[in-house]
Amino acid sequence: MAQKEQEILVSSGAGLGAAVGVEGEGGGAPSYDDTEAVRARGYWELVWRRFRRDKVAIASGIFIILLILVAFVGAPIAKHFIGHGPDDIFTGTAAVDSVSLLPANPWTHIDNYYTNKQDVLVLGAANRLGQDEFLRLLYGARVSLEVALLSTFGVMVIGVILGSIAGYFRGWSDTIISRITEVTMAFPLLLFIVALAATVGPQLDNITFGGVFPNGVVTLVLIFTIFGWFYPARIMRAQVLSIREKEYIEAARMIGASDSRIIKSHVLPHLIAPMIVYSTLIVASYVLFEAGLSFLGLGIKPPTASWGNLLSDAPQYYTTRPLLMVWPGLAVLLTTLAFNLLGDGLRDSFDPRSSN
Amino acid sequence: MHRRQWLAVMMIVAGASLLIAASFASASTSSGKALKKGGIFRYGLVGASTQVDPQLAYVTTAWSLEYATAAKLYNYPDKKGPAGSKLLPEVASKFTVSNNGRVYTFTIRPGFVFSDGTKVTAKNFKYAIERTANHDLASPGAPFIIDPSGTNIVGAKAVNDGKTTHVSGVVAKGNKLTIRLAKADGTFMAKITMPFFQATSTKVPLTKEVVNVTKTNLPSAGPYYMVRNDPDRLTQLRLNPHYKSGPGRTRPHNLAGVDVSWNLNEQTAFNQTLANQLDESVPPAAEVQGVAGKYGVNKSRFWTQPVNCTGYLPMNVSRSLFKGNLNLRKAINYVINRKDYVSQAGPYAGQPWTHLFNPGVPGWKNVTLYKKNLATAKKLAKGHFKSGKINVGYRTNSASNIAQSQIVRRDLISLGFKPGDITMKGFSGADLYDAMGHRNTDLDMGTNMGWCSDYPDPYDWVNILLHGGSSIQAENNVNYSYFNDPKWNKKMESAARLVGPNRLKVYGQLDLDVMSQAAPMAVERTYNNRYIFSNKVNPQSLVYQGIYQDFDWAAIALK
């Protein structure tokens, strides 16, 4: 029997990037009777199919999920089982040498004078106060992730809103937003942070929303958000400028759709891909920025643990306790690497021209 | 007779031989001690720079600079130990005191010349007193000359109140400087020897602080003068070209100059000193044991000396938390773990202490007023936390200071303060002193603070640090607790009037009484200085000047 011409069905509801797919049973040529309904793959399904082929991005994603679990769930559990907290000071115990002030090596048993029990310092002591390196690493992860994720959320919200308004409406709103963006870009952020730390920094650091966030997190999130939105705003503005000229926007306008409806239904969905990709990339930069500022004594300040202030304590022991530099350094390196690789993977996945 | 003549000849020959041998021995000893001239001594410091204006400089490092640059009426010689605390005439050749002990007349020698070539006259000392008393300049030296119970120069209070700019009780006429006191004061000579009262050029503005120094705007008449001061970066001293040996001008000046670099990283400065790129720095606490083992103590490159300083946490009684809150102040004295606090500074740092007079202060007593007792502390503090909020200042310039502030924070939490209610405010270098010295400071307490003797008398500890009265200014205060209790003020005034052994005895007891009964501060420690030197520094030239609590830069020589 001659093979009949196969019917090709095109999904009309597939949305952006809709592709055509035909699936049939293997073996002989299908007949009308045994042909399954041809199913078109959705946009997100295609993104997922492309993404899951990228093993490095998958591994990075898994690492990030584990890191989040470790930071927010594992840290309190570890604290409970170990028997002391990350900020507890253990001077006068085996955690610190009383003469040389050297922090203890990994797996040192100490007398916990808060509970009168014996505890173990898994990765040793972090500093001359005998604070637990392992717990401070875990709680430092929480601080780093909170700062990075909340700041990213903040800059994306502001950036997307202002970028969309500037790109869609153009005219005077574009002019005003673009000038504000330029002023923000030119702002000497580091000097501002130094000045802030020297003046109202301590008061701001005490804003914790009833202990929900560790000291200093809200300050950094606010600073990063206020001075970091300009980059996503510029990207989103450029995207919207291009989208607003598309035919489907024209069509929507012709059938009388309001601006808010056009933005909500036809502009914003097209911004999701760049938003996700850009977010993952700037999370990594904020992890680094937080660590850098804390290293300089301008970010998260003791006793709150952060990878940056763990790193700033470490150099004084670089010849005697080099691992104190390795642990937080490795944590920062792996986290930023994971977010960057995930971002790269997502960018490829969202790109329909991606070869894979 | 003949035999006697021979004997006489033999004796003469033996005597001459001894004389020749002695002269050779003397020559060889003096050549062994001969110190090299020239070279720049490079000193590296962590933290912000200090004030350099002679009437405003008032921390130990600043006074080390002043000691090298100042010419004073009388001065302490460049000698270690008790010999270094004996006052000797410098610019003044002599002084006379009137019978009632109220009028001092100094005779000014010729030959002292400022670094800009101007001659030093009596007017330069009058100007120093007027600058110190000046209302707008707000010198921390003012309380020393307007104290009704101590030194009170006639007319200085009016100047300090801003009513006039000339101190009526000081007259400069020809080579005579006359200073009239409101009443006799046995400590006057010690006070007038403080660097505030050095010969000051009239080119220095009366009411404005000299901050940035170029070669000519801060002349001085001592062995060195300041050629450059970039705050927080670099301060440079160079030889005063007009300082020539002569009567009163006997101070050593071996180096060609001193460069003080500020704001260095503690570890970096230490490493640079080990590598001989810097000549002196303070070793980080964690490195002290290592360098002490490697170089020995007080032998070659690592030196430690007790200093006449006491470390304490002032509790600001002008703010609501500690105002009228003796229980909380005492509770803090009981809760502070002094052993932990001192241990953060590493070996040879000092020892835990509970009252103001350290073993270097005349009249000191060896007692422990507060032993750590959490139960007692909590009992005392219960119901006395007021708002529960406390602002604590600390110094960020070394890992030790940061760790000590964390110890204090931990102890405050164990007392009952909530972690979220404790605001820790970091300050670089000596900036914490400036902040606590502002009358309207928002700090309730300061950590890593201390006081060093200005001159060897207990008045300098009790009355200067704790007498309220009229000495509290808008800024540059040193009564960091803002303690001002009429009952205690009266006791301090009575003690100040005493002389001799009874003065020391009364002051010694007053120290214990005020610390145990009023607790305006929580004393935590005594101090030792610890320094690492480069291998270029000649250890034989190191003179620890006890009055200035530091090695004397004018005496230092390089190899």
Image (tube, rainbow, N blue to C red):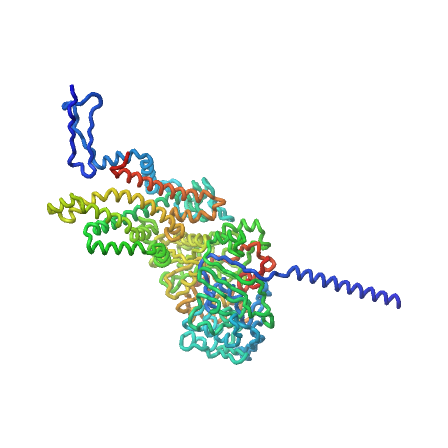
- The answer to which of A34 and A103 lies nearer the viewer is A34
Q: Is residue B201 above or below residue B418?
A: below
Q: Can residue B510 be seen here?
A: no
Number of numbered markers: 0
Q: Position of A193 compared to A31: left or right?
A: right
- Which picture quadrant has residue B487? bottom left
| Residue A349 image offset from top left, x and y in percent | 27, 37
Quadrant position of the N terminus of chain B in the picture: bottom right
Q: Can residue A15 be seen here?
A: yes
> Farthest residue toward the top?
A1
Quadrant position of the C terminus of chain B in the picture: bottom right
| Residue B221 image offset from top left, x and y in percent | 53, 70
Q: Is residue A148 above or below residue B26?
A: above
> Farthest residue toward the right?
B2
- The answer to which of B272 and A112 lies nearer the viewer is B272
| Residue B234 image offset from top left, x and y in percent | 47, 60
Q: Is residue B151 above or below residue A168?
A: below
- The answer to which of B523 and B548 lies nearer the viewer is B548
| Residue A336 image offset from top left, x and y in percent | 35, 43
Q: Residue at x 23, y 35 (%)?
A: A45
